Image: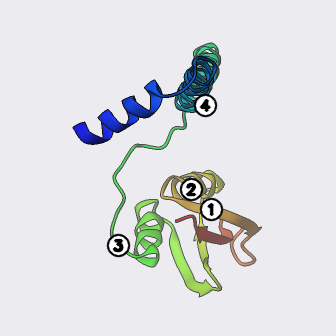
Amino acid sequence: MKALLARVQDKFASLQQREKLFVCGGAAVVLLALLYTALIPQLDRNTDLAHQQKQLQADILWLQQQQAVVSRLTNSCSSSTASVESARDLLTKLIRRNQLRLKNLREVGDGLVLSFSSSDANRTVRIAHQIACQGFVVDSIQVTEGANQPNLWDVSMEVSYVN
């Protein structure tokens, strides 16, 4: 390495004064180009991060302003853990828990159709809410008055599982 450095110094010493200036100027330009190519990506990254920080601060401010709206959006579903039982078993339990009479529960496509009867129309609304709280989408509800008994409601409900 010392021999190479000595040869370069000898070659540089043998150059004329204006050639030495030209070589020093070229070395300075190369050094500036290296610094430029090394620093520009870092400066761009810094600018991007500053922009991202401003955007995130604006998002946080907006979320803080929306806190009152978000707190009103909470639902009345209990925060129960996900059950591992089948959709059919879960729906059957909900129907029985609400003291409704299950007539039919069948799979149609990627959903379920359940038919039950109720003596109270409010129970129909309550069961629809409970089904929705269990992760189902209530696609349609059809409530008709019982033909033989005027105080009995026949309900047909189509549900599909969200997950």
Q: Amino acid at mark 2?
A: Ala
Q: Give the distance between the C-alpha atoms of the residues marked 2 and 1, in whole angstroms.
A: 6 Å
Residue at which label 3 appears:
85
Q: Which mark is residue 132?
A: 2
Q: Quadrant of residue 161?
A: bottom right
Q: Are marks 4 and 3 in contact (CB under 8 Å)?
A: no
Q: Give the distance between the C-alpha atoms of the residues marked 1 and 4, in whole angstroms.
A: 18 Å
The residue under the point 54% across, 31% down is 34
The residue under the point 71% across, 78% down is 148
Q: Are marks 4 and 2 in contact (CB under 8 Å)?
A: no
Q: Which mark is residue 73?
A: 4
Residue at which label 1 appears:
137
Residue 57 vs residue 32, the one in the foreground: 32
> Please, what secondary structure does the residue beneath circle 1 have?
strand
Q: Are marks 3 and 1 in contact (CB under 8 Å)?
A: no
> Please, what secondary structure does the residue beneath circle 4 have?
loop
Crowd band around label 1 with a 10 angstrom C-alpha radius: few (<14), some (14–19), many (20+) = some
Q: Give the distance between the C-alpha atoms of the residues marked 3 and 1, in whole angstroms.
A: 17 Å
Pick the quarter of the image with the N terminus.
top left
